[in-house]
Amino acid sequence: MTALDERRGAARVATISALIVVAAFVAGKAARDAILLSHFSIQSLPLFIGIAAVLSFPVILIAGRLMTRFGPARLVPVLNVVSAGFAVGEWLLLGRFPRVIAVVVFIHLSTASAVLVSGFWSIVNERFDVQTAKRHIGRIGMGATLGGILGGLVAERTAVHLPPNMILLVLAGLQLVCAGTLFAFGRTSLSEAAEAPSEGTWTALRHAAKAPLFRNVGLIVVLGAVAAGLIDYVFKADIVAAASNGELLRSLAVFYTITNVLTAVIQLSVCGPIIARLGVPRSVATLPITVTAFSLVALVIPIPMSAAFARAAELVTRNSIYRSGYELLYAPLPEERKRPTKVVLDVGADKVGDIFGAQLVALIVFAAMDARMMLLMAAVITGVLALFFAMRLPRSYTKALEDSLLDHAAEVAAVEPPAPAHAEPWLSLTGLPTFGNPDAVPLRMRSRTRRRATPPPARVNHGPHD
């Protein structure tokens, strides 16, 4: 089997894995919200979101350390099995201790799901180089989108034909399937992952704080989570007011199914062209633009469906254009930093945003006369702030990419002499370098590369006849 056939086979397995991983994530999200809101009022939701976010930080630190030691290809399948075991135990106890186990389910699925999804994308990042990832990211993203549709349909059919608590057993089954597919996908990169030493979580956090690219990315993730929490509360308050406890799971499942169908349409029709036209960093700005615009619409048109439209637009953009661009932002990061840094930004920054968002929601709901209007105004302001930092991404991304290319060229130049100029074309694919040619460096960077990579020739004394 040729290397090209191996990459294609890995891309097919990655697509199937994405489908199952996201199906489990969407089904789990519908299950956790429906079970919690069946036993507690909507006003208590910010409290539990904040508690889950705070408790997720030890999980993030432990997951980052384990990712560093074992690699995501080994670790993530095991975590899926552990999470499935928790879901079975929660199903057994939910009937006896409904309110306590409802909280446990919410915290479990809020913390574990984010780590599992981030772990899957970490495997994708390690398995494919930049050129291969650009070629297959659309297909893998489509698998994730179809998984969202599947997860919504599974949750909706479970609500119709089975008792609501059975969704936990269904989720456990999905996560066991996840473990099998991720093991099949990740084992192709186990030897590579084992060879590259990785940094610790705290070291990765320090690097992320110092690097302009990942500092901006972290702020965007935090602000995006705050805005999503604000819109999500308004949306769920409308759902709780309109549906009975028995209909909550089905209502949420239908909503998530519709949003994932729309995400599939976006993926098929405009996601690739938009990323190709805007470039990787600017495609990330589509999320704050969407949040700001649709929150304004919901503010101007104060009807229940407007919040649902705003939340749907945020989810569709997040899971299509934004997600594809966001994953490719990690291309310039050296391999030894990628694992822990991605966990810190993917999960840690998102949970910080959840905490801030939950506190802001609780403050507004408690203090404001018109909580709905104030929540949507806060979402608009947060979206504008996120857009400000997103507009700074292109420059910081270009600098990080140039530094990565220069370091790579220096390593190659230290081993072999540079190739002739006619053999060094600058190739690009929607703004990213193709690493097939190890010396593919832009012409404007050649002089910098030679100064850093090529030592001056030594002077040799051949005698008086020279």
Image (cartoon, grey):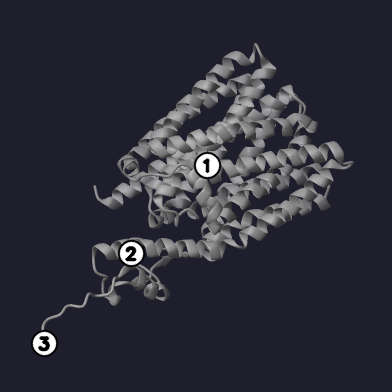
What residue do we see at 81% from left, 41% from top?
364
- Label 3–label 2 contact, CB within 8 A: no
Residue type at tag 2: Ala
Q: Residues within 10 Å of mark 2 (few under 14, many from 20)?
A: some
For marks 2 and 1, give the CA distance: 42 Å
Would residue 81 be found to the left or right of residue 186 on screen? right
- Residue ID for mark 2: 410
- Residue ID for mark 1: 146
- Give the x, y percent position of residue 46: 73, 34
Residue type at tag 3: Pro
Q: Is residue 10 above or below residue 430?
A: above
Would residue 408 be found to the left or right of residue 19 on screen? left
- Residue ID for mark 3: 464
Q: Residue furthest right?
A: 369
What residue do we see at 23% from left, 65% from top?
416
Would residue 386 be found to the left or right of residue 441 on screen? right
- Give the x, y percent position of residue 296: 77, 54
Q: Does label 3 or label 2 sit earlier along the sequence? A: 2
Q: Foreground residue, 275 or 73? A: 73
